[in-house]
Amino acid sequence: MIEYVQGTVAHKTPTTVVIDVHGIGYEIFISVNTSTALEEGRDYKLLIHEVLREDTHDLYGFATEEERSLFRLLITVKGIGPSSARTMLSSYAPSDLARYIAEENGTALRTVKGVGARTAERIIVELKDKITEVLHPTAGAETGGSTDTVPHTEQYEEAEKAFVALGYTPAQARAVVAKLVKQDPDMSVNDMVRTGLRML
């Protein structure tokens, strides 16, 4: 089992990062929250959860133990796979998501793509008594803050790609990005994705 990957961020998007470890690039799936904590060209240690199947070997990376613990709890719930758990963690900060579960706030959970009333109820029933362990943040990757300096057109395309990677159609992605651009043309890619997930 891989516990963590430590190296230089060679490339990142709101949903993936490539970590260069002594010349080997590891593609790792991440949430918007973790993406915000990373900067290209800097060194980080990402905590890892491996997903092994017959046809794939995926790595999911997390900036904090709090986020990884919550991810691991979420995927124990029937109907919540790694992709859905990542979308939930991209929609809300880990502490907020954990609090919604602890407070049995099904309305907040249902705003996440793919989480209906039954799934939200299942998450609450199965996790509300286990969630206290992730209500308090712990240290993980070095935080560096995101500074998006790409041109607007590239920035908007990056946001659209992130929505598609999270399961939305290209048409849905373009529509929500267009709305966000009207609201704030200078919104960062990560803020676009986080805000847009609540609108879709």
Image (cartoon, helix red, strand yellow):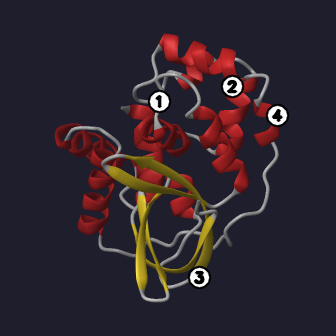
Q: Is residue 89 left or right of residue 143?
A: left
Q: Neighbour class for label 2 at 10 Å: few (<14), some, many (≥20)?
A: many
Mark 3 or mark 2: whose residue is earlier in sequence: 3
Tags 2 and 4 touching, CB below 8 Å: no
User: Where is 71 relative to 16, above or below?
Assistant: above
Q: Position of residue 114 (x, y in %)?
A: 40, 26
Q: Name the amino acid type tagged 2.
A: Ile
Q: Which residue is mark 2?
A: 101
Mark 2 or mark 4: whose residue is earlier in sequence: 2
Q: CA distance from mark 3 to mark 1?
A: 31 Å
User: Where is 141 relative to 57, above or below?
Assistant: below
Mark 3 or mark 4: whose residue is earlier in sequence: 3
Q: Which residue is mark 4?
A: 132
Q: Name the amino acid type tagged 1.
A: Val
Q: Is residue 56 left or right of residue 38?
A: left
Foreground label between 3 and 1: 3
Tags 3 and 2 touching, CB below 8 Å: no
Q: CA distance from mark 3 to mark 2?
A: 33 Å
Q: Position of residue 6 (x, y in %)?
A: 59, 76
Mark 2 or mark 1: whose residue is earlier in sequence: 2
**Quadrant of the drawing holding the C terminus:** top left
Please tell me the numbered disc located at residue 43. Answer: 3
Q: In terms of secondary structure, where does tag 1 sit?
A: loop
Q: In terms of secondary structure, where does tag 4 sit?
A: helix
Residue 187 visible? The answer is no
User: Where is 137 relative to 101, above or below?
Assistant: below
Foreground label between 1 and 4: 4
Q: Which residue is mark 1?
A: 112
Q: CA distance from mark 1 to mark 4?
A: 21 Å
Mark 3 or mark 1: whose residue is earlier in sequence: 3
